[in-house]
């Protein structure tokens, strides 16, 4: 058992801040690392100590494992929290920490590397009770064999990169004639994006839901699940709206998926927080997709309904403690929604919209949580993920969580960049979402950018208010400048 007194957070933005907040609550001091682009970032000011580790591009700063370890040695850091992205799923970095005697707050390098590759993950869970997507579980090297397999599975099929992530390296093939072309594209995409061209073929599930299970494991053999998150609303295979619990799971299905997720964790002797992702079919089957061996972006919705601080639990497990709860202690309290607020233009197919946050004012009030790393006047840098914040609500039930989300979105003021907030409102008001009857195709089937214009008008009005505020500020400045030339009251008082 080792008590952690100082944590370095090898990350930036909202997640760095999120982790540091819990550390502070636990009386643990915090170290931020930052790139030159983040000199004035909120996480840097929040930390007890901060060290600049290089220029803006992540491969010259946030991805420099060796340099981060050096900082740990210099500042007597006990443990590193990697957040998500960057080095969080890098087995080599976890090993580097281990060798340097710094605790890596996460699973072992072995668990990370097995689960980091979709084919090795499929292989690892083979002997456990984990349902898998129908299809091949080996690399498809030549086109003829791939075609045969695809015919056996039945079209449509999905060609997937084994090293894939973030929705990249995936190709849907509707018919046999397209197989050759799509496979070549998938291999070249995988090679250039991940440096690994291995692909495999599985059944493409039409109209599925993405349902994932949060698990937590300690080093004493205890593994619990903290229920599910439904992340079916996605654009470009990437999540934008998440909720807990899912609107479609029965208690029996929830238990079955929870059990399967625990089996996945056991297959690699998992420790810490992890997420087991499943695809959920229209006829209520579920299949293992992959395991993310880190804290997930959407973890707050689980925290809202379970009352468990996942970061606190991660730190305790890293210290060698047993989990602070047992499976039977856990229950779902109410409902939680999350909208990822990206600096993206939903009118332009969600293309990044980088710029300055001229106006930035967060919603407040009952049942609202905002995890962010920005303040008014700051720039959304081009170098990193364009997520500004995560807007999270909690309600007694799903309807209350949705209505609260609409209220919070209306209260959120962001000017200077386009955001996914109007899209979030669209989703919360949409009949398909409200009824719970939707799939990962929500955006393709139900989203109509034209219908966002009403929200846009509100924004134009805000822009006008902002412009008049600027004029007012200028007028105030002029008045102030004139005053300095006049004798001030203070001076006058003194001469009196
Ligand atoms: P990544 O590592 O890129 O996130 P995943 O395997 O987790 O890849 O899949 C990302 C998303 O792609 C899923 O959430 C789901 O929407 C879709 N997807 C993945 N596999 C399938 C499948 N077999 N059939 C249909 N959709 C799929």
Image (cartoon, grey):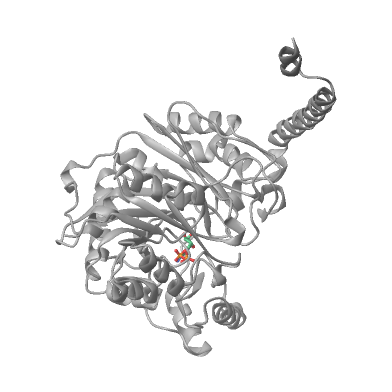
User: Residue 324: horizontal and vertical position, in percent?
Assistant: 19, 47
User: Residue at left 25%, top 59%?
Assistant: 318
- Give the left or right position of residue 128, taking residue 443 as reference: left
Q: Residue furthest front?
A: 495
> Residue at 72% of width from left, 42% of height from top?
450
| Residue 58 can be seen, yes or no | yes
Near-viewer residue (154 or 59): 59
* Point 37% across, 74% down: residue: 91
**Place of residue 199 in the rendered image (x, y in percent of width and height, measured from the top left):** 48, 80
Quadrant that contains the N terminus: bottom left
In the rendered image, which quarter contains the C terminus?
top right
Q: Which residue extends farthest left?
A: 220
Q: Is residue 246 visible?
A: no
Q: Position of residue 63 (x, y in %)?
A: 49, 70
Q: Give the image location of residue 49, x and y in percent.
A: 44, 54
Q: In the image, is 28 to the left or to the right of 301?
A: left
| Quarter-of-image position of residue 315 | bottom left
Which residue: 56% across, 76% down? 193
Q: Nearer the viewer, residue 209 or 72?
A: 72
- Exactly how many numbered labels are in the figure? 0
- Compared to 431, does 294 lie above or below? below
* In the rendered image, the vertical position of residue 202 relative to residue 441, given as above or below: below
- Reply above or below: 442 against 451: below
233 vs 426, left or right, is left
Hey, which quadrant is residue 60 in on the image? bottom right
Q: Nearer the viewer, residue 92 or 478?
A: 478
Which quarter of the picture shows residue 138?
A: bottom left
**Left/right of residue 473 with respect to residue 195 in the rendered view:** right
């Amino acid at each position: 058992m080792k008590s952690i007194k100082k944590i370095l957070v090898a990350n930036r933005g909202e997640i760095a801040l999120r982790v540091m907040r819990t550390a502070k609550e636990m009386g643990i001091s915090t170290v931020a690392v930052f790139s030159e682009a983040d000199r004035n970032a909120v996480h840097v000011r929040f930390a007890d100590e901060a060290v600049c580790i290089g220029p803006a591009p992540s491969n010259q700063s946030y991805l420099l494992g060796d340099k981060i370890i050096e900082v740990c040695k210099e500042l007597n850091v006990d443990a590193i929290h990697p957040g998500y992205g960057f080095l969080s799923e890098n087995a080599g970095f976890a090993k580097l920490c281990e060798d340097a005697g710094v605790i890596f707050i996460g699973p072992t390098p072995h668990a990370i590397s097995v689960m980091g590759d979709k084919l090795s993950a499929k292989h690892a869970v083979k002997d456990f009770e984990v349902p898998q997507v129908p299809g091949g579980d080996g690399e498809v090297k030549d086109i003829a064999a791939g075609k045969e397999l695809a015919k056996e599975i039945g079209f449509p099929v999905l060609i997937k990169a084994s090293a894939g992530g973030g929705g990249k390296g995936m190709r849907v093939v509707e018919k046999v004639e397209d197989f050759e072309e799509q496979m070549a594209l998938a291999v070249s995409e995988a090679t250039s994006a991940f440096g690994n061209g291995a692909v495999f073929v599985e059944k493409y599930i039409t109209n599925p839901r993405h349902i994932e299970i949060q698990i937590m494991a300690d080093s004493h053999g205890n593994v619990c699940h903290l229920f599910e998150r439904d992340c079916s609303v996605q654009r470009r295979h990437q999540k934008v709206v998440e909720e807990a619990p899912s609107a479609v799971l029965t208690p029996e299905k929830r238990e079955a998926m929870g059990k399967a997720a625990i089996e996945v964790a056991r297959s690699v002797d998992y420790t810490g927080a992890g997420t087991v992702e499943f695809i959920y079919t229209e006829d209520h089957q579920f299949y293992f997709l992959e395991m993310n061996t880190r804290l997930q972006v959407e973890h707050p919705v689980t925290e809202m309904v379970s009352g468990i601080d996942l970061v606190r639990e991660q730190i305790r497990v890293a210290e060698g403690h047993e989990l602070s709860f047992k499976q039977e202690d856990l229950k779902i309290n109410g409902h939680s929604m999350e909208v990822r607020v990206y600096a993206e233009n939903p009118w332009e197919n969600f293309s990044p919209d980088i710029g300055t946050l001229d106006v930035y004012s967060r919603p407040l009030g009952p049942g609202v949580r905002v995890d962010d790393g920005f303040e008014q006047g700051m720039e959304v840098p081009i170098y990193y993920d364009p997520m500004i914040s995560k807007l999270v609500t909690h309600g007694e039930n799903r309807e209350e969580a949705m209505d609260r989300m609409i209220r919070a979105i209306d209260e959120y003021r962001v000017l200077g960049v386009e955001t996914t907030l109007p899209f979030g409102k669209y989703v919360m008001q949409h009949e398909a979402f409200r009824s719970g009857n939707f799939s990962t195709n929500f955006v393709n089937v139900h989203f109509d950018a034209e219908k966002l214009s009403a929200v846009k008008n509100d924004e134009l009005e805000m822009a006008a208010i902002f412009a008049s505020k600027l004029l007012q500020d200028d007028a105030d400045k002029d008045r102030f400048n004139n005053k300095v030339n006049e004798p001030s009251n203070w001076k006058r008082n003194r001469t009196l």
